[in-house]
């Protein structure tokens, strides 16, 4: 991949910066590397790229990092919002109204199952190119595409076992939750003492004896023994219960991405650019101690200062090819920068320029997606935009 010192066309450079939503300041003759002014807040994003003389319009691939303000769920749709049919007023009022309705009319409680929009849906505006989302953007960082890139999609499946007695126990427990608890208790005692009949199976009292032996083994376990139903059965008859083992879906996983970037400053301005990139990432990934204070990184705080800690910024990641969405590589959901490791002696030796800039720096970023991947997410990514998530 070419990384020469091409001359940057200022007009084309300006067009690219506008295409990603960064605010351009100054005259068209200024480049994104030296012309954009830094802003501490949101809504006036600054643009940082490395290497310093990198050509944004060159036919080379790059990695774009966009820092955006964390957006909580919409009011009334997140945890602690209005649950149930009494949506006016506070969430407590809503639950109270539903309870009163349940008590008076005998109808079941109704709860709002929308527990807040997923993080990705809150940032869909940006993915659709909505310029209005710039007000939540702090900065852009464009880097050469990492040499080692991969994505791993996984879900959790787990083994599950359920023998005949487990199924019977579940049925009994469900029945005892009904209004006929005393009757079901009598049925349980009858099953233990007189036998168990299973439709279509000739039991001959075997299941009854097995059940009694199992219960006896469980009682012995209270004194420190370690007896299972299969231990009892195997000793007495050479049989064990059929466990009906099956692999069942057990949950979703969140993806993690690690990127390694090497910085080697070739001039003083490039050293300053590297410093700004590292500093900006560190600051954006840090929580805000001002909590619900009046302004970004404010020291005045207000009445809430010292009570709350606000979430760090999130990051929207994109692989680019020639300044556009990469036609093959994966796309990302909003990510949190969970870890940032900087090695200032990347070549194994401490060596700096006269202004203190290390000669060789290695930076490792660990991003974690804020939402799992679902099959429906792929419907929103055209095949021309790559493999999807």
Image (cartoon, rainbow, N blue to C red):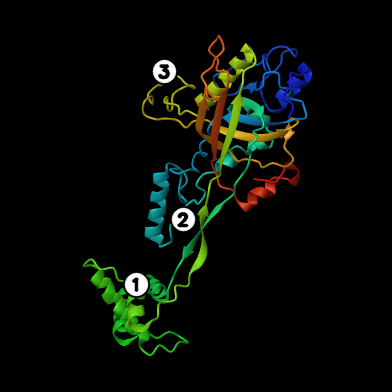
Count up the numbered dots: 3
Q: Nearer the viewer, residue 191 or 3?
A: 3
Q: Can residue 113 be seen in this snapshot?
A: yes
Query: Looking at the rendered structure, which numbered label has been put on residue 176?
Result: 1
Residue at 66% in and 23% down: 22
Q: Considering the numbered disc 3 on the image, is that residue within a helix, a strand or a loop?
A: loop
Query: Looking at the rendered structure, which numbered label has been put on residue 300?
Result: 3
Q: Decide: few, some or many residues near mark 3? Use Cα within 10 Å; few <14, some 14-19, many ≥20.
A: few
Which residue is the site of mark 2? 110
For the residues carrying marks 2 and 1, which lies nearer the camera in this image?
1
Q: Nearer the viewer, residue 375 or 276?
A: 276
For the residues carrying marks 2 and 3, which lies nearer the camera in this image?
3
- Answer with left or right where residue 14 lies relative to residue 220: right
What is the distance, in whole Å, between disc 1 and disc 3 at their CAs? 60 Å
Residue 344 in the image: state x and y as whole percent. 52, 22
Residue at 37% in and 59% down: 103
Please say if the residues under marks 2 and 3 sit with CB atoms less than 8 Å apart: no
Between discs 1 and 3, the one toward the N terminus: 1
Q: Decide: few, some or many residues near mark 1? Use Cα within 10 Å; few <14, some 14-19, many ≥20.
A: some
Please say if the residues under marks 1 and 3 sit with CB atoms less than 8 Å apart: no
Q: Decide: few, some or many residues near mark 2? Use Cα within 10 Å; few <14, some 14-19, many ≥20.
A: some
Between discs 2 and 1, the one toward the N terminus: 2
Residue 356 in the image: state x and y as whole percent. 53, 12
- Answer with left or right where residue 60 lies relative to residue 211: right
Q: Considering the numbered disc 1 on the image, is that residue within a helix, a strand or a loop?
A: helix
């Amino acid at each position: 991949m070419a990384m020469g010192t091409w001359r940057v066309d200022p007009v084309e450079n300006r067009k690219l910066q506008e295409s990603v939503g960064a605010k351009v300041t100054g005259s068209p003759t200024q480049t994104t590397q030296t012309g954009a002014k830094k802003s501490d807040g949101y809504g006036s994003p600054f643009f940082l790229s490395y290497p310093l003389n990198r050509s944004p319009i060159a036919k080379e691939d790059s990695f774009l990092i966009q820092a955006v303000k964390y957006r909580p769920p919409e009011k009334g749709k997140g945890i602690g919002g209005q649950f149930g049919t009494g949506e006016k007023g506070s969430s407590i009022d809503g639950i109270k109204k539903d309870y009163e309705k349940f008590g008076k009319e005998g109808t079941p409680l109704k709860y709002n199952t929308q527990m807040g929009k997923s993080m990705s849906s809150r940032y869909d505006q940006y993915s659709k190119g909505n310029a209005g989302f710039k007000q939540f953007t702090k900065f852009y960082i464009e880097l050469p595409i990492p040499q080692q890139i991969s994505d791993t999609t996984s879900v959790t499946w787990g083994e599950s076992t359920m023998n005949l007695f487990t199924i019977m126990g579940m049925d009994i427990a469900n029945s005892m939750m009904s209004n006929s608890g005393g009757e079901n208790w009598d049925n349980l005692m009858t099953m233990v003492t007189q036998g168990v009949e299973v439709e279509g199976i000739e039991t001959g009292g075997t299941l009854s004896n097995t059940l009694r032996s199992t219960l006896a083994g469980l009682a012995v376990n209270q004194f420190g023994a370690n007896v299972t139903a299969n231990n009892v059965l195997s000793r007495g008859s050479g049989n064990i219960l059929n466990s009906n083992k099956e692999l069942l879906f057990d949950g979703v996983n969140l993806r993690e991405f690690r990127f390694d970037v090497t910085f080697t400053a070739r001039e003083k301005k490039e050293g300053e650019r590297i410093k700004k990139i590292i500093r900006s990432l560190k600051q954006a990934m840090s929580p805000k101690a001002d909590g619900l204070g009046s302004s970004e990184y404010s020291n005045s705080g207000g009445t809430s200062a010292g009570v709350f800690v606000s979430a760090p910024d999130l990051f929207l990641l994109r692989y680019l090819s020639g300044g556009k969405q990469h036609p093959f590589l994966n796309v990302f959901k909003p990510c949190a920068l969970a870890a940032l490791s900087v090695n200032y002696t990347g070549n194994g030796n401490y060596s700096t320029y006269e202004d203190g800039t290390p000669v060789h720096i290695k930076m490792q970023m660990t991003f974690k997606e804020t939402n799992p991947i679902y099959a429906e997410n792929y419907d929103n990514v055209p095949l021309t935009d790559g493999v999807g998530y």
